[in-house]
Amino acid sequence: EIQSKPNRSAFKPDEAFVIFVLGGPGSGKGTQCSKIVKDYNFAHLSAGDLLRAEQNREGSEYGDLIRSYIKSGQIVPQEITIALLKNAMQSEIDKGTNHFLIDGFPRKMDQALTFEETVVPSKFTLFFECPETVMLERLMSRGKTSGRDDDNIDSIRKRFRVFIDQSMPVVNYFDNAGKVAKLQCDEPVDAVYARVQKKLEDHGV
Ligand code: UP5
Ligand code: MG
């Protein structure tokens, strides 16, 4: 089991301001979140990065399981990802931040419901719309140097399929609740970022 860190201050997730950042594989979630944290007082938590760190952590009992899920583009069981996110949120709260960009999560309905019921409801979701051809090109090009086990054509195809089948229902669910800000992201990074800033302002950030 993933141990929760000893609490230095009480975890008050119900006071956290959470923005989910969703979009297909390679749509630019990580790139845009890195830009946001330079200009705004948010902590950036990438569920994928947390899973990769846990996968590589010496002594983790979940390393092999996470590795096989990521390689095949499947969604790791929610208990693991949510425990990692809660730990990471607690660390940030201890450092004085309670504004979070949660990148690449929730990407399955069960995760969305569990997180909003047991941690905190999100304020809204930034959703990056991007044609598959563009995402494919970006990921194949990143794959030359990324060292990521899932930046290869077989894994990328699986990730696209899982995104459509399992993650789009989450986006639609939040959209029906009026909680999605959609952005086109098939443009240079800075042009996309200008749109991101506009959406943040629209939501009072
Ligand atoms: N790039 C970015 N923006 C660009 C632009 N505007 N113009 C030109 N190039 C641009 O960008 C990807 C590449 O494109 C980079 O080379 C970048 O320079 C360039 P990036 O910002 O990394 O895109 P991002 O959307 O973050 O892509 P990423 O590959 O991280 O998306 P995924 O959603 O596939 O990956 P993630 O790490 O979130 O998840 C990986 C796996 O972890 C999942 O498939 C799943 O198996 C597992 N997972 C879970 O099981 N549960 C979770 O909750 C989360 C993940
Ligand atoms: Mg990413």
Image (cartoon, rainbow, N blue to C red):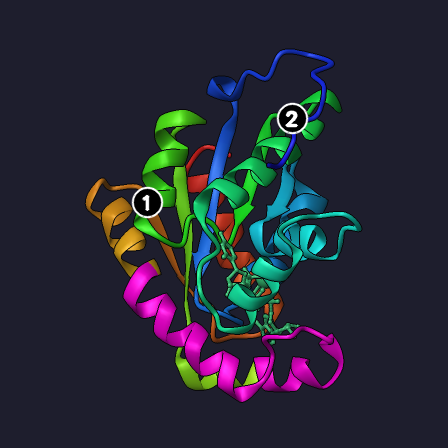
Q: Is residue 123 visible?
A: no
Across and down, in percent, residue 33 comes to 61, 52
Say which element carries label 1: helix
Query: Which of the two residues, 126 or 196, is positioned nearer the viewer here?
Result: 126
What residue did someone put label 2 on? 90
Query: Which of the two residues, 21 or 35, is positioned nearer the viewer here?
Result: 21
Which of the numbered marks, if any, corresponds to residue 70? none
Across and down, in percent, residue 88 comes to 65, 35
Residue 187 lies left or right of residue 4; in this view the side is: left
Q: Is residue 139 visible?
A: yes
Across and down, in percent, residue 204 comes to 45, 32
Q: Judge whether residue 95 is colored magenta.
A: no
Q: Taking 42 as reference, is 105 above or below it?
A: below
Query: Which of the two residues, 9 or 16, is positioned nearer the viewer here?
Result: 9
Question: Does the magenta stretch mainly form a helix, a strand or a loop?
Answer: helix
Q: Judge whether residue 158 is colored magenta.
A: yes
How packed is label 2: few (under 14 Cα within 10 Å), some, or many (20 or more)?
many
Calculate the distance from the C-alpha at mark 1 to the C-alpha at mark 2. Answer: 22 Å
Residue in the picture at 59% in, 17% down:
11
Q: Taking 156 as reference, is 16 above or below it?
A: above
Q: Are marks 1 and 2 in contact (CB under 8 Å)?
A: no
How packed is label 1: few (under 14 Cα within 10 Å), some, or many (20 or more)?
few
Quarter of the image where one finds residue 124: top left
* First of labels 1, 2 by sequence position: 2
Residue 57 lies left or right of residue 158; in this view the side is: right
Q: Amino acid at mark 1?
A: Asp
Residue in the picture at 55% in, 36% down:
83
What residue did someone put label 1 on? 110
Say which element carries label 2: helix
Span colored in magenta: 139-166
Q: Taking 122 as reference, is 70 above or below it?
A: below
